[in-house]
Image (spheres, helix red, strand yellow):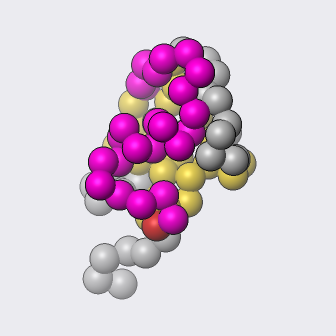
Amino acid sequence: PRIFLINNDGGGFADYVEVEDGTTIDQFFASQMRGSRPSEYLIRVNRDQVQASYELTNDDRVSITPTKVEGA
């Protein structure tokens, strides 16, 4: 499946990403945000919070936003 990723960490970026069938949001976060803890981010799929076991499907929209902003 192809999903749209919006990463609001640091400078931020948005782009389409290919994932394997059956990829969970937890697995996806780990692959995209290496070394980061999910508890430090607001992770949404199609504007809704989901369980870590949620399986991504084609055209899902994932946004990853830090809950704390450096220097704020």
Which corner quadrant of the image does residue 29 belong to? Answer: top left
In this picture, residue 50 sits left or right of residue 8: right
Residue reaching furthest bottom?
72
* Residue 59 appears in the figure: no
* Image x and y of residue 32, in percent: 36, 40
Q: Examine the structure image and report whether residue 43 is included in the region drawn in magenta.
A: no
**Going 29% across and 55% down the picture, which residue do you hit?**
35
Q: Which of 44 and 24 is in front in this view?
A: 24
Q: In which quarter of the image is the N terminus?
A: top right
* Image x and y of residue 36, in percent: 35, 58
**Going 61% across and 28% down the picture, which residue do you hit?**
56
What residue range appears in magenta? 16-39
Which corner quadrant of the image does residue 13 belong to? Answer: top left
Q: Examine the structure image and report whether residue 21 is included in the region drawn in magenta.
A: yes
**Going 39% across and 31% down the picture, which residue do you hit?**
15
In the figure, 72 relative to 54: above or below? Answer: below
